[in-house]
Image (cartoon, rainbow, N blue to C red):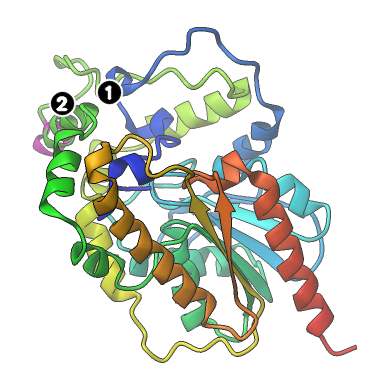
Amino acid sequence: MGLKRIPLAVMGLSLVCTPLAVPPTALAQEKEPPAIDPLLAPYASTKDSARLPDGRWMHLVCMGQGSPTVILTTGANSWGIAWSKVQPAIAAKTRVCAWDRAGFGLSTGVPKPQTVDQTTTDLQAVLAAGRIDGPYVVVGASMGGWESLLLKDRMPSKVVGMVLVDPSFPEQNQRQDRVYSPALKAWDDSHLPPFLSVWRKCAAALRAGTLRPGAPDPDRCLSAPKPPPTYPPELAAALDKARAERTPEIRAATLEGMLAGAELNAINSKVTIKPNRNYGNMPLIVLTAQQVGGVPGIPADLQPDAALMTAEWRKGHKELAALSTRGEDRIIEGAPHDIASAKPQVVIDAIDQVVGEVRASRPR
């Protein structure tokens, strides 16, 4: 996910995209390489990828058979492998597809950072080009929650169920700004990751045209980062190929999108406002992460300030659950923001329940 109006220690920066966007100087080194993760192998395949009318290729990984089709949408700065612990289990019961936003994973990039209005338009185009017919159960994590809401707004009869995984919510930034204390903001600003400055330099040089093959590259912006040791060779090769095909303009836009997380999310928070949303009795589950013992990393004297931010987050999730008469807001104790990686079974169970309820409600 990107920077939000919530403490970085709570939300963090998702670096799943690092094989394509982050200079090697920003990567942490493992002391002992872990074993290759076989669950990641399917995300190297492009057999399901869809070509959009504008010529872009959007990476899509589908598994299983059956209806409804589950559509998996990650948080910002992430891509399909974020669902690697969830998707195979869902595929045992129904068809499930994960997609990559423009510029992430194996999807073609775009020259400018995108708002959720634009990424949701891409998602609609992916579903059409990939001939993925509804009905859909949409599953959105973090920023993917905004896209899930917009997809339901635009395709009300096709979206028949929803699972939101610690999701973003309408007017999020504006609401959290009202309880974002100066002291907490100062602490956040003083703890920004140091590699952000590297990203800024790289993006500026790419835009200016001063960074090109053969020219000095002290920050190694153009160097191919070493993929995580858990990646199968075929996935590493696919990512290297996708990265090599990206123009300097596209690479700059990807970095700029991550750097402009707060600004983009302020727009996204407004774009998704719709006062009259009503999902009737559509199956809907919201999963809310709850760290035990306060917010990790935040000093004790700032914990009350952080608690106000967390309370606003909780309130937003309750409002999302209330969109349906069958809506549930489940508090996942001890879970970080990335619930799908830390507690995948919780997400699997929620999706299974919604799929089951959708099937049970169909006319025989």
Q: Residue 161 appears at what percent x and percent y?
A: 65, 74
| Residue 207 included in the magenta stretch of the image | yes
The residue furthest top is 31
Image point 65% across, 45% down: which residue?
344
Q: Amino acid at mark 1?
A: Leu
**Which residue is label 2 attached to?**
211
The answer to whether residue 234 is left or right of residue 22 is right
* Cα separation between marks 1 and 2: 8 Å
| Magenta-tinted stretch | 205-209
Residue name at image x 25 percent, y 55 percent = 5
Q: Is residue 362 magenta?
A: no
Left or right: 322 with respect to 215?
Answer: right
* Position in image of residue 343 (x %, y %): 63, 43
Is 112 left or right of 119, judged from the image as shown?
A: left
Is residue 261 depicted above or below 308 in this figure?
A: above
Q: Which residue is mark 1?
A: 222
* 333 over 179 or under it: above or below: above
Q: Is residue 239 left or right of residue 214?
A: right
Three-letter amino acid code at the position of disc 2: Leu
The residue positioned farthest toward the right in the image shown: 364
| Nearer the observer, 159 or 345 | 345
The vertical placement of 308 against 283, above or below, is above
* Element class at badge 2: loop
